[in-house]
């Protein structure tokens, strides 16, 4: 007889206990497919869902030029800043947040009690701001909420609270992005910067100072947009500088039949930026803005499909909102960096929160503009592609679908990449967690990126 303690199973023969639990083990271990049905049955090709109007330009030339000028104004704004946007109290709030929740590190152990104090000492906020100059990133770099590469997780391994959800990863910047440097860490190893897409700490070696001559030469040219991830960038002597990813921008200096000649920024021995030349193949780049057609949007969207999910841009991957930001950059359509800002400030916002799921679907199909509408719920944002077999389809970079399995343990079926799905991804899963509702239940609103022109009152 069994002598150990198994609660109500005490006293069961070992074989009887095995037969009793075997079905549960098989259910728990064998019931999860490798991918969700949506990804298997819907072609993962944004061009597949276009209609006969896909090659039509959706906006007149004057409006598109105005949007592109606004993009450039926001993109270069950090170079024309005299004071930081973020105050000392803003930065102290970040420290306070992590004081209240020290969290866990990369070793899955709780941070030491003095961890946040060491971060506070390094941040040197009693002297904020101690810089105040224009700069440019010279490599791809992460924007961190504290001056450290080490992570902060809410739990050691909880679904949605452990890896890869590092709370210190605010965003990531492409190489050669304009920034305003407002502050330095106590050890001078880190600088706090503001950019067109966010703020945070960068390693000091990732930034070079720019002067007025550099700015004038750089920002008064057409911009070339990269359309291929991991495009190697070399200087005129063939020396590798960095890999440029889709959505990166470089000033055009000249072109030949096969390539654009562009400016790139490199640091000199004093960490001042100097301009060098490089070539970007026309197979990997285009002049911004691209003509705004749904076919072009779909072609650019395919660059991002199946690319790995990257929380906050970690590992130079993309999350849901950075995928959309980089997708629309080649068209000169500026989007904020984070999902809620994209929804509320990226265009004309339509509140759907008061509707039931069926009514939300009807509103999306009726009012949504395929390839030009964003669908938003708290913490996630998607691009509406139109309908397929009567259902709305979306393109989004998603981590996974929430599951709840044996013994009510919360988990995730990991998708981990940019995919095309319905608004009910994973609905076929037996272990799908339906307690909190799906995407449609949580959907708050839809944003039209290109709104119809306001009628002129002729009276």
Image: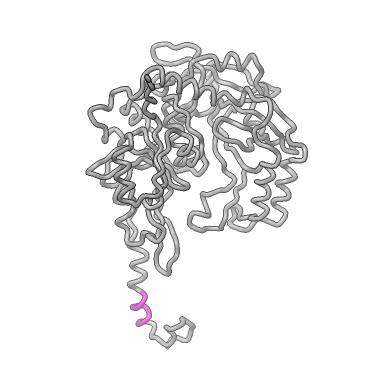
Residue at 55% x, 38% y: name it: 171
Residue 350 sits in which quadrant?
Answer: top left
Q: Position of residue 304 (x, y in %)?
A: 39, 35
Residue 169 sits in which quadrant?
Answer: top right
Residue at 58% x, 21% y: name it: 265
Would residue 20 be counted in the magenta stretch? Answer: yes
Q: Position of residue 426 (x, y in %)?
A: 33, 53
Task: Look at the picture and state if 9 lies above or below 366.
Answer: below
Task: Look at the picture and state if 306 lies above or below 102.
Answer: above
Task: Look at the picture and state if 25 lies above or below 400.
Answer: below
Q: In front: 309, or 86?
A: 86
Q: Is residue 345 left or right of residue 135?
A: left
Q: In front: 359, or 434?
A: 359
Would residue 209 be counted in the magenta stretch? Answer: no
Can the viewer see residue 360? Answer: yes
Span of residues in magenta: 16-21
Can the viewer see residue 35? Answer: no
């Amino acid at each position: 007889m069994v002598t150990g303690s198994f609660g109500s199973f005490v006293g069961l023969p070992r074989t009887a206990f095995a037969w009793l639990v075997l079905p549960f083990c098989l259910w728990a271990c064998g019931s999860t497919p490798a991918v969700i049905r949506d990804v298997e049955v819907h072609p993962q090709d944004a061009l597949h869902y276009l209609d006969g109007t896909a090659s039509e330009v959706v906006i007149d030339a004057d409006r598109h030029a105005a949007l592109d000028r606004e993009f450039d104004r926001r993109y270069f704004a950090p170079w024309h800043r005299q004071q930081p946007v973020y105050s000392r109290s803003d930065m102290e709030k970040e420290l306070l947040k992590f004081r209240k929740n020290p969290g866990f590190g990369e070793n899955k152990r709780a941070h030491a009690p003095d961890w946040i104090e060491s971060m506070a000492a390094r941040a040197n906020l009693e002297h904020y701001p101690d810089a105040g100059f224009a700069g440019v990133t010279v490599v791809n770099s992460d924007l961190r909420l504290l001056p450290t590469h080490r992570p902060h997780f809410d739990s050691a391994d909880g679904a949605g609270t452990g890896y890869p959800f590092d709370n210190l990863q605010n965003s990531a910047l492409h190489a050669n992005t304009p920034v305003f440097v407002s502050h330095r860490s106590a050890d001078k190893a880190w600088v706090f910067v503001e950019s067109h897409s966010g703020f945070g700490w960068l390693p000091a070696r990732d930034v070079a100072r720019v002067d007025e001559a550099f700015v004038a030469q750089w920002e008064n040219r057409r911009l070339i947009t990269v359309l291929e991830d991991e495009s190697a960038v070399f200087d005129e002597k063939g020396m590798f500088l960095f890999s440029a990813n889709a959505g990166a921008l470089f000033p055009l200096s000249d072109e030949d039949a096969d390539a654009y000649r562009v400016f790139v920024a490199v640091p000199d021995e004093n960490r001042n930026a100097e301009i060098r030349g490089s070539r970007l193949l026309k197979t990997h780049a285009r002049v911004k803005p691209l003509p705004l057609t749904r076919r072009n949007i779909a072609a650019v969207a395919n660059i991002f499909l199946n690319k790995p999910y990257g929380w906050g841009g970690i590992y130079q991957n993309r999350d849901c909102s950075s995928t959309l930001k980089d997708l629309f950059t080649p068209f000169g359509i500026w989007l904020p960096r984070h999902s809620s800002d994209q929804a509320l400030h990226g265009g004309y916002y339509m509140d759907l929160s008061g509707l039931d799921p069926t009514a939300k679907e009807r509103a999306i199909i009726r009012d949504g503009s395929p390839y030009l509408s964003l669908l938003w719920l708290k913490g996630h944002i998607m691009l509406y592609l139109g309908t397929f077999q009567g259902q709305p389809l979306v393109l989004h970079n998603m981590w996974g679908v929430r599951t709840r399995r044996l013994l009510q343990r919360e988990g995730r079926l990991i998708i981990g990449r940019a995919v095309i799905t319905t608004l009910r991804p994973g609905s076929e899963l037996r272990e799908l967690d339906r307690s909190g509702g799906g995407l449609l239940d949580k959907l708050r609103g839809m944003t039209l990126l290109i709104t119809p022109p306001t009628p002129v009152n002729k009276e």
